[in-house]
Amino acid sequence: MRHHDRNKKLGREKNQRGALMKSLARSLVLHEKIKTTETKAKALRPYVERLITQSKKNTIPARRMVVSKIGTDGAKKMFDILGPKYKERRGGYTRITKLQRRNSDDSKMSLIELV
């Protein structure tokens, strides 16, 4: 049976995985699109979509949670720009587009962007 395999390990320990997700989410929020591997993009999507849903609420607990997940610079943009932008949207804030494989190690690459 395949229990406890919901989240991808990405070849990292738990704290490293958390730092990776925090860094990728901050980059995605600040730049609105990033190029990464397909597996990381698929792991990042639910992480960012939960944060955007929180930013739509615009409450103090929501702000604290978002700041703890991506930092103050990313949270400021989420609550000032992205929250109001996606106020009427009920999910599906990101798009993953597959790209050519990376030359060096033949990894599947993807572009993840905010819709």
Image (cartoon, helix red, strand yellow):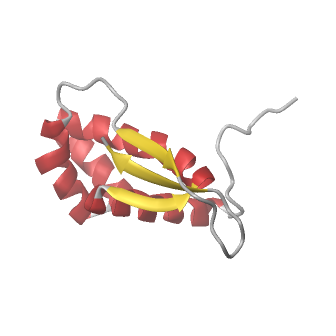
Where, by quadrant of the figure, is residue 51 drawn? top left
The answer to whether residue 100 shows anywhere in this view is yes
The structure residue drawn at horizontal position 52% and vertical position 64%, both measured from the top left corner, is 20
The structure residue drawn at horizontal position 63% and vertical position 59%, both measured from the top left corner, is 14
Image quadrant for the N terminus? Answer: top right
Q: Position of residue 34 (x, y in %)?
A: 41, 60
Q: Position of residue 68 (x, y in %)?
A: 35, 56
Q: Position of residue 106 (x, y in %)?
A: 71, 66
| Viewer-nearest residue: 2 or 88 | 88
Number of marks drawn: 0
Q: Position of residue 115 (x, y in %)?
A: 30, 40
The structure residue drawn at horizontal position 38% and vertical position 55%, both measured from the top left corner, is 69
Q: Is residue 111 left or right of residue 27?
A: right
The structure residue drawn at horizontal position 43% and vertical position 51%, both measured from the top left corner, is 112
The answer to whether residue 59 shows anywhere in this view is no
Extreme residue in the right direction = 1
| Viewer-nearest residue: 37 or 90 | 37
When the figure is inspected, residue 80 is found, relative to residue 53, above or below; the finding is below
Q: Is residue 64 left or right of residue 59?
A: right
